[in-house]
Image (spheres, helix red, strand yellow):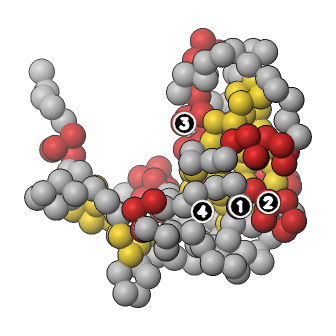
């Protein structure tokens, strides 16, 4: 297995962390540095970032996020298991009205960088955006696109073969192991010409 494949396999959507394990501002800046060298639609580079790693602000951000909808109320991490840092990805509308796919590219890149250093995270797009904008005191020309929750993961995530019925919903078993069904490569390839 190659290095990249190993990192991709370790890069799961983690939702439970060692909340008291600090993530430094310098490390968050390293992740944004990775994002700064990724491809960008039209090379516009319209994304900006807010880095958060203090307990007070972490709690405020946490309260604006919705977690793991398939787990029906059990998806949000408990106190002590919450992220120890966040990166809020913003679209600067003074540069562009359209992020294209830039936020997906930078989010995956930053999460791979986090995994490489023993951290993990989760991309969250179910956000109370107006509330979070007010908390962060953002000027109106910044649109919140995504929040990346980061920390030292304490949960085990297992990839499963997609069941015959095609049910792609993830679940947790009695031991709180998180199971994620994945489609096979053969199912993903429509044809080879």
Whether the residues at callouts 1 and 2 have beta carbons within 8 Å, the answer is yes
Q: In which quarter of the image is the C terminus?
A: top left
Query: Is tag 1's residue or tag 3's residue first in the polypeptide sequence?
Result: 1
Q: Which residue is drawn at 12% across and 29% down?
A: 191
SS class of the residue under badge 1? loop
Q: Distance between the residues labelled 4 and 2?
A: 20 Å
Q: Residues within 10 Å of mark 3 (few under 14, many from 20)?
A: some
* Residue 57 drawn at (x, y percent): 84, 59
Q: Which residue is drawn at 67% across and 71% down?
A: 82
Residue where numbered disc 4 is placed: 120
Q: How crowded is mark 1: few (under 14 residues within 10 Å), some or many (20 or more)?
A: few
SS class of the residue under badge 3? helix
Residue where numbered disc 3 is placed: 104
Query: Is tag 4's residue or tag 2's residue first in the polypeptide sequence?
Result: 2
SS class of the residue under badge 4? strand
Q: Return the residue nearer the eye: 24 or 117.
A: 24
In front: mark 3 or mark 2?
A: 2
In front: mark 1 or mark 4?
A: 1
- Is 99 located above or below residue 113 in the figure? above
Residue where numbered disc 1 is placed: 63
SS class of the residue under badge 2? helix
Is residue 93 in sight in this rendering? yes
Residue 23 quadrant: bottom right
Q: How far apart are marks 3 and 2 (CA)?
A: 24 Å
Residue where numbered disc 2 is placed: 60
Q: In this view, does 45 lie to the left or right of 122?
A: right
Whether the residues at callouts 3 and 2 have beta carbons within 8 Å, the answer is no
* Residue 90 drawn at (x, y percent): 72, 34
Q: In this view, does 17 lie to the left or right of 58?
A: left
């Amino acid at each position: 297995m190659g290095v990249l494949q190993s990192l991709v396999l370790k890069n799961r959507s983690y939702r439970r962390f060692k909340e008291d394990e600090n993530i430094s501002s310098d490390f968050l800046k390293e992740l944004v540095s990775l994002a700064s060298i990724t491809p960008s639609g039209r090379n516009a580079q319209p994304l900006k970032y807010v880095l958060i790693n203090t307990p007070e602000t972490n709690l405020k951000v946490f309260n604006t996020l919705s977690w793991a909808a398939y787990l029906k109320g059990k998806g949000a991490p408990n106190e002590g298991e919450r992220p120890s840092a966040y990166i809020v990805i913003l679209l600067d509308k003074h540069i562009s009205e359209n992020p294209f796919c830039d936020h997906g590219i930078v989010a995956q890149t930053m999460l791979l960088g986090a995994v490489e250093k023993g951290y993990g995270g989760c991309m969250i797009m179910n956000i109370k955006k107006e509330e979070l904008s007010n908390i962060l005191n953002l000027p109106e020309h910044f649109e919140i696109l995504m929040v990346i929750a980061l920390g030292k993961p304490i949960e085990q995530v297992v990839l499963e073969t997609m069941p015959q019925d095609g049910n792609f919903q993830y679940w947790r078993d009695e031991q709180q192991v998180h199971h994620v069904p994945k489609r096979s490569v053969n199912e993903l390839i429509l044809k080879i010409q």
